[in-house]
Amino acid sequence: MKNRFEIEFSALSQNEAFARLCISAFLLPLDPTVNEMSDIKTAVSEAVTNSIIHGYEGIGGTVHMSAETDENIVYIEIRDKGRGIEDIEAARKPLFTTKPDCERSGMGFTIMEAFMDKITVVSEKDKGTKVTMTKKLRG
Amino acid sequence: MNINYKKDGATLLVTLGGDIDHHTAQEISDGIARSFRHSHCKNIVIDFSGVNFMDSSGIGMLIGRYKETEIFGGALAAVSVSSELMKIFRISGLNKIIDCYDNARLALSALRGE
Ligand SMILES: Nc1ncnc2c1ncn2[C@@H]1O[C@H](COP(=O)(O)OP(=O)(O)O)[C@@H](O)[C@H]1O
Ligand SMILES: [Mg+2]
Protein backbone atom coordinates (compact mmCIF):
# COMPACT_ATOMS: atom_id res chain seq x y z
CA MET A 1 0.00 0.00 0.00
CA LYS A 2 1.20 3.51 -0.81
CA ASN A 3 0.98 6.33 1.68
CA ARG A 4 2.22 9.90 1.60
CA PHE A 5 2.30 13.19 3.50
CA GLU A 6 3.45 16.69 2.77
CA ILE A 7 4.13 19.57 5.16
CA GLU A 8 5.56 23.06 5.16
CA PHE A 9 7.07 24.82 8.13
CA SER A 10 8.97 27.99 8.93
CA ALA A 11 12.76 27.83 8.69
CA LEU A 12 13.22 28.03 12.48
CA SER A 13 15.62 25.83 14.40
CA GLN A 14 12.92 24.57 16.79
CA ASN A 15 11.27 22.93 13.76
CA GLU A 16 14.21 20.52 13.37
CA ALA A 17 12.76 18.42 16.21
CA PHE A 18 9.27 18.88 14.74
CA ALA A 19 10.41 17.45 11.38
CA ARG A 20 11.98 14.42 13.11
CA LEU A 21 8.79 13.82 15.06
CA CYS A 22 6.67 13.97 11.86
CA ILE A 23 8.74 11.43 9.99
CA SER A 24 8.83 9.05 13.00
CA ALA A 25 5.08 9.23 13.46
CA PHE A 26 4.51 8.62 9.74
CA LEU A 27 6.83 5.59 9.61
CA LEU A 28 5.80 3.97 12.90
CA PRO A 29 3.00 1.83 11.38
CA LEU A 30 5.60 0.20 9.07
CA ASP A 31 7.33 -1.13 12.18
CA PRO A 32 10.91 -0.12 11.33
CA THR A 33 13.74 -1.27 13.62
CA VAL A 34 15.07 1.19 16.21
CA ASN A 35 18.19 1.55 14.06
CA GLU A 36 16.29 2.22 10.84
CA MET A 37 14.11 4.81 12.55
CA SER A 38 17.15 6.50 14.05
CA ASP A 39 18.98 6.55 10.68
CA ILE A 40 16.02 8.15 8.93
CA LYS A 41 15.44 10.71 11.69
CA THR A 42 19.11 11.67 11.56
CA ALA A 43 19.12 12.06 7.76
CA VAL A 44 15.95 14.19 7.90
CA SER A 45 17.45 16.32 10.65
CA GLU A 46 20.56 16.93 8.51
CA ALA A 47 18.62 17.98 5.42
CA VAL A 48 16.16 20.19 7.32
CA THR A 49 18.95 21.84 9.31
CA ASN A 50 20.82 22.57 6.06
CA SER A 51 17.77 24.30 4.58
CA ILE A 52 17.39 26.38 7.73
CA ILE A 53 21.00 27.40 8.33
CA HIS A 54 22.49 27.40 4.83
CA GLY A 55 19.52 27.81 2.49
CA TYR A 56 17.73 30.53 4.42
CA GLU A 57 20.64 32.03 6.33
CA GLY A 58 19.55 35.37 7.70
CA ILE A 59 16.54 35.62 5.36
CA GLY A 60 14.11 33.02 6.71
CA GLY A 61 11.57 31.18 4.61
CA THR A 62 9.61 27.99 4.32
CA VAL A 63 10.95 24.43 4.36
CA HIS A 64 8.97 21.84 2.48
CA MET A 65 9.05 18.17 3.42
CA SER A 66 7.19 15.23 1.93
CA ALA A 67 7.50 11.50 2.33
CA GLU A 68 6.04 8.53 0.58
CA THR A 69 6.07 4.85 1.43
CA ASP A 70 5.50 2.06 -1.04
CA GLU A 71 5.45 -1.26 0.79
CA ASN A 72 8.77 -1.14 2.69
CA ILE A 73 10.45 1.59 0.63
CA VAL A 74 10.61 5.11 2.04
CA TYR A 75 11.09 8.20 -0.16
CA ILE A 76 11.72 11.56 1.48
CA GLU A 77 12.02 14.95 -0.16
CA ILE A 78 13.18 18.10 1.62
CA ARG A 79 13.41 21.37 -0.26
CA ASP A 80 13.89 25.07 0.22
CA LYS A 81 13.79 28.18 -1.95
CA GLY A 82 16.98 29.53 -0.41
CA ARG A 83 20.36 30.56 -1.73
CA GLY A 84 21.22 27.20 -3.33
CA ILE A 85 24.52 25.35 -3.59
CA GLU A 86 27.11 26.53 -6.10
CA ASP A 87 29.19 23.35 -6.26
CA ILE A 88 27.16 20.32 -5.22
CA GLU A 89 30.01 17.87 -5.70
CA ALA A 90 32.25 19.83 -3.32
CA ALA A 91 29.43 20.33 -0.80
CA ARG A 92 28.82 16.58 -0.57
CA LYS A 93 32.44 15.81 0.35
CA PRO A 94 33.16 14.92 4.00
CA LEU A 95 34.30 17.89 6.11
CA PHE A 96 33.24 20.46 3.50
CA THR A 97 31.46 23.34 5.18
CA THR A 98 30.96 27.01 4.38
CA LYS A 99 30.44 27.69 8.11
CA PRO A 100 33.50 26.35 10.00
CA ASP A 101 33.21 29.26 12.47
CA CYS A 102 29.85 28.03 13.84
CA GLU A 103 31.20 24.60 14.90
CA ARG A 104 29.72 23.02 11.77
CA SER A 105 31.49 19.77 10.96
CA GLY A 106 30.74 19.44 7.26
CA MET A 107 29.52 15.88 7.88
CA GLY A 108 25.81 16.38 7.09
CA PHE A 109 25.81 15.01 3.55
CA THR A 110 28.21 12.21 4.53
CA ILE A 111 25.76 11.12 7.25
CA MET A 112 22.76 11.30 4.89
CA GLU A 113 24.67 9.11 2.41
CA ALA A 114 25.73 6.59 5.04
CA PHE A 115 22.33 6.35 6.74
CA MET A 116 20.11 6.17 3.64
CA ASP A 117 20.34 3.89 0.58
CA LYS A 118 20.41 6.74 -1.91
CA ILE A 119 20.45 10.53 -1.87
CA THR A 120 20.04 12.96 -4.75
CA VAL A 121 20.75 16.69 -4.51
CA VAL A 122 19.41 19.20 -7.02
CA SER A 123 20.26 22.84 -6.46
CA GLU A 124 20.47 26.13 -8.28
CA LYS A 125 22.10 29.31 -7.02
CA ASP A 126 19.53 31.72 -5.56
CA LYS A 127 16.68 29.35 -6.51
CA GLY A 128 16.91 26.68 -3.84
CA THR A 129 17.84 23.10 -3.02
CA LYS A 130 16.02 19.79 -3.16
CA VAL A 131 17.32 16.69 -1.38
CA THR A 132 15.67 13.34 -2.15
CA MET A 133 16.46 10.28 -0.03
CA THR A 134 15.42 6.65 -0.29
CA LYS A 135 15.68 3.80 2.17
CA LYS A 136 14.36 0.27 2.10
CA LEU A 137 13.21 -1.03 5.47
CA ARG A 138 14.61 -4.51 5.90
CA GLY A 139 13.44 -5.12 9.46
CA MET B 1 17.91 20.35 26.86
CA ASN B 2 19.08 19.52 30.36
CA ILE B 3 22.69 20.13 31.35
CA ASN B 4 24.15 19.25 34.74
CA TYR B 5 27.70 19.84 35.92
CA LYS B 6 29.73 18.19 38.66
CA LYS B 7 33.39 18.65 39.45
CA ASP B 8 35.54 15.64 40.29
CA GLY B 9 39.14 16.72 40.92
CA ALA B 10 40.55 17.90 37.60
CA THR B 11 37.53 16.63 35.67
CA LEU B 12 34.25 18.35 34.85
CA LEU B 13 31.45 15.79 34.55
CA VAL B 14 28.67 17.01 32.25
CA THR B 15 25.38 15.12 32.11
CA LEU B 16 23.19 15.87 29.10
CA GLY B 17 19.50 15.12 28.68
CA GLY B 18 17.46 15.59 25.49
CA ASP B 19 18.23 15.92 21.79
CA ILE B 20 21.49 17.31 20.42
CA ASP B 21 20.77 19.10 17.16
CA HIS B 22 21.52 22.50 15.65
CA HIS B 23 18.77 24.04 17.79
CA THR B 24 20.35 22.90 21.07
CA ALA B 25 24.06 22.57 20.17
CA GLN B 26 24.91 26.25 20.62
CA GLU B 27 23.43 26.34 24.13
CA ILE B 28 25.29 23.13 25.05
CA SER B 29 28.59 24.43 23.65
CA ASP B 30 28.30 27.76 25.43
CA GLY B 31 27.20 26.13 28.70
CA ILE B 32 29.99 23.57 28.81
CA ALA B 33 32.63 26.11 27.69
CA ARG B 34 31.59 28.54 30.45
CA SER B 35 31.51 25.91 33.20
CA PHE B 36 34.80 24.45 32.06
CA ARG B 37 36.52 27.86 32.25
CA HIS B 38 35.16 28.52 35.74
CA SER B 39 35.92 25.01 36.99
CA HIS B 40 39.72 25.18 36.48
CA CYS B 41 39.49 21.55 35.35
CA LYS B 42 41.52 20.08 32.50
CA ASN B 43 39.32 17.14 31.54
CA ILE B 44 35.68 16.92 30.46
CA VAL B 45 33.53 13.80 30.72
CA ILE B 46 30.17 13.94 28.92
CA ASP B 47 27.48 11.49 30.01
CA PHE B 48 25.16 10.69 27.09
CA SER B 49 22.81 8.31 28.93
CA GLY B 50 19.98 10.87 28.69
CA VAL B 51 20.59 11.75 25.04
CA ASN B 52 17.97 10.29 22.70
CA PHE B 53 19.21 11.88 19.51
CA MET B 54 22.33 13.47 18.04
CA ASP B 55 23.05 14.60 14.49
CA SER B 56 26.15 16.20 12.95
CA SER B 57 25.61 19.37 15.01
CA GLY B 58 26.90 17.29 17.94
CA ILE B 59 30.15 16.53 16.10
CA GLY B 60 31.12 20.20 15.87
CA MET B 61 30.10 20.74 19.49
CA LEU B 62 32.29 17.83 20.66
CA ILE B 63 35.30 18.79 18.55
CA GLY B 64 35.06 22.28 20.03
CA ARG B 65 35.15 20.87 23.58
CA TYR B 66 37.98 18.48 22.66
CA LYS B 67 40.09 21.43 21.52
CA GLU B 68 39.47 23.23 24.81
CA THR B 69 40.64 20.29 26.91
CA GLU B 70 43.66 19.93 24.60
CA ILE B 71 44.78 23.45 25.51
CA PHE B 72 45.14 22.36 29.15
CA GLY B 73 46.76 19.02 28.27
CA GLY B 74 43.56 17.29 29.35
CA ALA B 75 41.16 14.87 27.70
CA LEU B 76 37.55 14.61 26.60
CA ALA B 77 35.75 11.37 27.42
CA ALA B 78 32.23 10.09 26.74
CA VAL B 79 29.96 7.88 28.80
CA SER B 80 26.97 5.70 27.79
CA VAL B 81 27.28 6.22 24.04
CA SER B 82 24.41 4.27 22.45
CA SER B 83 24.96 2.20 19.30
CA GLU B 84 23.15 4.89 17.28
CA LEU B 85 25.44 7.61 18.61
CA MET B 86 28.47 5.40 18.09
CA LYS B 87 27.71 5.31 14.35
CA ILE B 88 28.10 9.09 14.26
CA PHE B 89 31.25 8.89 16.41
CA ARG B 90 32.78 6.39 13.94
CA ILE B 91 31.79 8.17 10.73
CA SER B 92 33.31 11.42 11.97
CA GLY B 93 36.38 9.89 13.64
CA LEU B 94 35.26 11.23 17.04
CA ASN B 95 35.94 7.75 18.48
CA LYS B 96 39.64 8.31 17.78
CA ILE B 97 39.92 11.44 19.92
CA ILE B 98 37.33 10.66 22.60
CA ASP B 99 37.61 7.63 24.88
CA CYS B 100 34.25 6.00 25.59
CA TYR B 101 33.29 4.37 28.90
CA ASP B 102 30.28 2.38 30.08
CA ASN B 103 29.60 4.62 33.07
CA ALA B 104 30.77 7.86 34.69
CA ARG B 105 32.56 6.07 37.54
CA LEU B 106 34.84 4.23 35.10
CA ALA B 107 35.57 7.39 33.13
CA LEU B 108 36.38 9.42 36.24
CA SER B 109 38.71 6.81 37.71
CA ALA B 110 40.49 6.40 34.36
CA LEU B 111 41.11 10.16 34.23
CA ARG B 112 42.35 10.14 37.83
CA GLY B 113 44.90 7.60 36.60
CA GLU B 114 43.50 4.78 38.72
N1 LIG C 1 19.90 23.59 1.62
C1 LIG C 1 21.10 24.16 1.39
N2 LIG C 1 21.18 25.41 0.86
C2 LIG C 1 22.38 26.01 0.63
N3 LIG C 1 23.58 25.42 0.89
C3 LIG C 1 23.58 24.18 1.41
C4 LIG C 1 22.35 23.48 1.68
N4 LIG C 1 22.66 22.25 2.17
C5 LIG C 1 24.01 22.19 2.20
N5 LIG C 1 24.57 23.34 1.75
C6 LIG C 1 26.02 23.61 1.61
O1 LIG C 1 26.72 22.37 1.69
C7 LIG C 1 27.70 22.42 2.73
C8 LIG C 1 27.88 21.04 3.36
O2 LIG C 1 26.71 20.63 4.07
P1 LIG C 1 26.86 19.57 5.26
O3 LIG C 1 27.58 18.38 4.73
O4 LIG C 1 25.51 19.34 5.85
O5 LIG C 1 27.82 20.30 6.31
P2 LIG C 1 27.54 21.52 7.34
O6 LIG C 1 26.05 21.70 7.47
O7 LIG C 1 28.17 21.07 8.62
O8 LIG C 1 28.20 22.73 6.75
C9 LIG C 1 27.20 23.50 3.68
O9 LIG C 1 28.25 24.07 4.43
C10 LIG C 1 26.58 24.51 2.70
O10 LIG C 1 27.56 25.33 2.12
MG1 LIG D 1 24.65 20.21 7.56
Image (tube, rainbow, N blue to C red):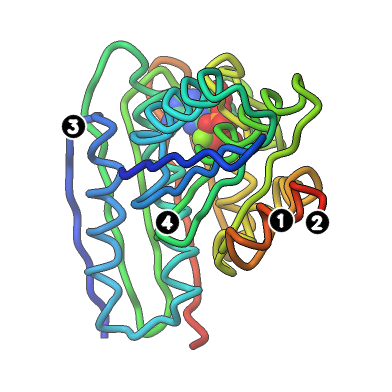
Residue annotated with mark 4: B51
Which sits in the foreground, A70 or B12? Answer: B12
Picture quarter with the N terminus of chain A: bottom left
Chain at tag 3 = A
To the question of a shared chain for discs 1 and 2, the answer is yes
To the question of a shared chain for discs 2 and 3, the answer is no
**Which of the 4 image quadrants contains residue B37?**
top right
Q: Label 1 neighbourhood size at 10 Å, few (<14), some (14-19), many (20+)?
A: few
Residue annotated with mark 1: B109
Residue located at (42% from left, 48% from top)? B16
Chain at tag 2 = B
Q: Nearer the viewer, mark 4 or mark 2?
A: 2
* C-alpha gap between disc 4 and disc 1: 23 Å
Q: Compared with residue B78, is residue A124 higher up or lower down, i.e. above or below?
A: above
Mark 4 or mark 2: name the one nearer the start of the chain.
4
Q: Is mark 2 within 8 Å of ligand 1?
A: no
Mark 1 or mark 2: name the one nearer the start of the chain.
1
* C-alpha gap between disc 2 and disc 3: 51 Å
Which sits in the foreground, B28 or B22? Answer: B28
With B45 as the anchor, is B112 left or right in this view?
right
**Which of the 4 image quadrants contains residue B88?**
bottom right
Q: Nearer the viewer, mark 1 or mark 3?
A: 1
Q: Nearer the viewer, mark 4 or mark 1?
A: 1
Chain at tag 4 = B
Q: Are marks 1 and 2 in contact (CB under 8 Å)?
A: yes
Q: Amino acid at mark 3?
A: Ser
With A111 as the anchor, is A14 left or right in this view?
left
Q: Amino acid at mark 1?
A: Ser
Q: Compared with residue A74, is residue B111 higher up or lower down, i.e. above or below?
A: above
Q: Label 3 neighbourhood size at 10 Å, few (<14), some (14-19), many (20+)?
A: few
Q: Which mark is residue A10?
A: 3
- Place of residue B31 in the rendered image (x, y in percent of width and height, measured from the top left): 42, 27
